Amino acid sequence: AQSVTQLDSHVSVSEGTPVLLRCNYSSSYSPSLFWYVQHPNKGLQLLLKYTSAATLVKGINGFEAEFKKSETSFHLTKPSAHMSDAAEYFCVVSDWVTGGGNKLTFGTGTQLKVEL
Amino acid sequence: DTAVSQTPKYLVTQMGNDKSIKCEQNLGHDTMYWYKQDSKKFLKIMFSYNNKELIINETVPNRFSPKSPDKAHLNLHINSLELGDSAVYFCASSQVMAGVNEQFFGPGTRLTVL
């Protein structure tokens, strides 16, 4: 079974400084990986996805992630944090399912706090 | 236009009651899902339906029964509610095409069992 591990449950940065949210995956084949964001009391929004095309994936709101097979990592970065980035971030791996659709397995989440 | 909608947004009820949560998607997707997010924000899949057929049924008590009247709707009925059922329930949908498998999530239903 595929899985993801988010290495930090909480990350705190100052506004304008870089953001790094770490994620390692475990998979016996080339995975499909995602980052989703959840703002307080809101649903989940897709930030970006990796599906075996380019290893550097650009997403919305200036976020990007790099797939590194040698390190089994898919870390999320942003050059400059904004107050509106404060949210819960989930690293997710996807498995195809016989019969249609896919099953998402979520990491435990990283809460990003952005301070003035 | 809301892509994936859920009703109600909040649901407060007593232990032992039966309740339903409704989900609708207007994206034309074939597959719909229910996820449960617990108090520690951990998200886990419960069910998925593809073209009204049950595909995924994780280890969920049989008090939970999903129903898909058509491929745009996936409802979740819960019998004999327990305190541990308190959580946020998210509906999602996807259209599986070559290389594209992202899921679109609804806003969630916060269920509180007293």
Image (cartoon, helix red, strand yellow):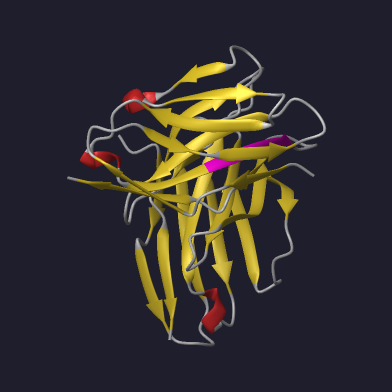
Q: Residue at x 38, y 58 (%)?
A: B7
User: Would you identify the image quadrant in which residue A28 lies?
Assistant: top right
Query: Taking B94 as reference, is B54 above or below it?
Result: below
Quarter of the image where the N terminus of chain B is located: top left
Judge by depth and name the residue closer to the eye, B63 or B72.
B63
Q: How many marks?
A: 0
Judge by depth and name the residue closer to the eye, A70 or A38.
A70
Q: Residue at x 62, y 13 (%)?
A: A53
- Give the residue at the far left of this rendering: A116
Q: Position of residue B70 (x, y in %)?
A: 58, 44
| Magenta run includes residue A39 | no
The answer to whether A9 appears left or right of A25 in the picture is: left
Q: Position of residue B18 (x, y in %)?
A: 52, 78
Query: Taking B42 as reference, is B18 above or below it?
Result: below
User: Would you identify the image quadrant in which residue A64 lies?
Assistant: top left
Q: Residue at x 70, y 29 (%)?
A: A31
Please tell me whether the stretch drawn in magenta is mainly helix, strand or loop: strand
Judge by depth and name the residue closer to the eye, B37 or A107.
A107
**Can residue B9 be seen here?**
yes
Q: Residue at x 34, y 25 (%)?
A: A79
- Give the residue at the far top of this rendering: A54
Q: Position of residue A60 (x, y in %)?
A: 37, 25
Which stretch is magenta?
A91-96
**Can residue B71 be seen here?**
no
Quarter of the image where the C terminus of chain B is located: bottom left
Q: Position of residue A115 (x, y in %)?
A: 22, 47
